[in-house]
Image (spheres, rainbow, N blue to C red):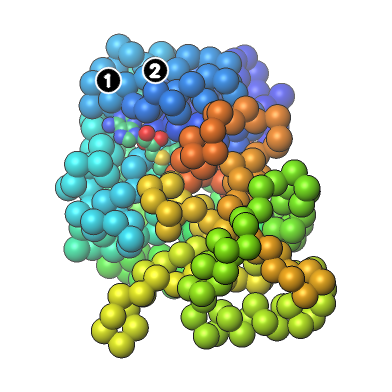
Amino acid sequence: MMASDLPGDALTAFEFFAGGGLAGLGLEGFQVTFANDIDRAKASSWQANHAGAFHTGDVRDLTPEDLPGQPDLVWASSPCQDVSLAGTRGGLAARRSGTFWSFWQLMQALDREGRGPRAIVVENVVGLLTSGQGRDFPAICSALVQAGYRVGALEMDAALWLPQSRPRLFMVAFRDAEAPTGSHPAPPFHTPRLIAAHDRLPKPVRSAWAWWKVGPPSRPNLDIGALLEPDDAVQWLGPSDVGHLLELLAPLHRERLDAAQRSGERRVATGFRRVRTEGGVRVQRLELRFDGVAGCLRTPSGGSSRQYVLVCDDGRVRARRLTGREAARLMGLPDTYVLPKGETAALRLMGDAVAVPVVRTLTDALLRPALIRARIAA
Ligand SMILES: C[S@@+](CC[C@H](N)C(=O)[O-])C[C@H]1O[C@@H](n2cnc3c(N)ncnc32)[C@H](O)[C@@H]1O
């Protein structure tokens, strides 16, 4: 269903933990009437790319008076550092990821005023399925169910749409709105670890569970090579830096690189530096992939979080850092998206964002049709 099917005002959405506003860009057919983030630099990026009201500040300081009207949908991409498998694993009880509960208190306050949304989407890393000693995922599902929502989740990897491996968890909840469901979990978005987490939920939550029906994209994703800047528009590392980098390759990765060089064809690899324990000793390694897909973008917090691009052609190897614009393309953004000045700021913005085509798929398959039907029926 299209937004033009709707009598009266457009569908509206609030975007919490909005960052650069990539969720809002995927919510086609919705007008974002409120967005919030604590980070001033991200607020500037949001404002450079969107019209509308942005509130810069801590979600913990927001009150219902800051929120305009009753939105159809609320989107929350709450911080992941404490639930990520690479993070502290303190879960939703920890300081950063615990901001989810401040967001949730606002939703409860809106509800008490009769302004609660018909749909809520909570996006986070897949580590949320097991974080907090397995208590976090049931806690969010229970909160949604107690508030009268029917809840389901999907694990969606951006790699189905874009050449970036980026699995993320999308918890989608509807109240007084019907979205298509299946009677059983179905691939590719109801993954074994999601099904296992569902099976551990308390019975009353499982009774309000829905296996939302969302199909995979019909068009295959692009190869990373198609998103790269022209070779003469980027800064390549000098020979000694390339040499140092290649010394970090583990034997298997060295073999892959040698094979690519021997092929004589142009081959593109992406890679990260990682610390591995080998024979009880911690060593730094450069790990490459040649499958046409970039590794998951991360927020730059040190040398190891910046992704490398290696190009083999004519038997030589060149290496460089992935650029901010390339990172934006890997999130599904058009080149008209205004990036902050400076590579670190651009990569920081992209590193914890949500991939736009994934949001668009959820919007087309579930959110917009269900909410238009609910508005027409109301
Ligand atoms: C996972 S990112 C979401 C990014 C966003 N979805 C995007 O596409 O750019 C989490 C965001 O929460 C913001 N954040 C962290 N703590 C916050 C707080 N206490 N109040 C409001 N926002 C906060 C961070 O600045 C970050 O932009």
From where the camera sits, is residue 229 visible?
Answer: yes
Could you say which is closer to the camera, residue 201 or residue 246? Answer: 246
From where the camera sits, is residue 293 visible?
Answer: no
User: Based on the displayed image, in which of its 4 quarters is residue 279 positioned?
Assistant: bottom left
At horizontal 43% and vertical 26% (from top left) the residue drawn is 41
Give how far across and how far down residue 65 sits, in percent.
Answer: 30, 12
- Give the spatial CA distance, label 1 vs label 2: 9 Å
Q: Are marks 1 and 2 in contact (CB under 8 Å)?
A: yes
Q: Is mark 1 within 8 Å of ligand 1?
A: no
Q: Which label sits on residue 101?
A: none
Foreground mark, 1 or 2? Answer: 2
Residue type at tag 2 = His
| Ligand 1 visible in quadrant | top left
Q: Which label sits on residue 55?
A: 2
Q: Secondary structure at mark 1?
A: loop
Q: Which label sits on residue 62?
A: 1
Judged left or right of residue 3, residue 97 is: left
Give how far across and how far down residue 54 sits, in percent.
Answer: 45, 17
Q: Residues within 10 Å of mark 1 (few under 14, many from 20)?
A: some
At horizontal 48% and vertical 14% (from top left) the residue drawn is 53
Q: Is residue 137 above or below residue 277?
A: above
Q: Is residue 347 above or below residue 241?
A: above
Residue type at tag 1 = Leu
Q: Is residue 339 above or below residue 151?
A: above
Q: Secondary structure at mark 2?
A: strand
Could you say which is closer to the camera, residue 35 or residue 234? Answer: 234
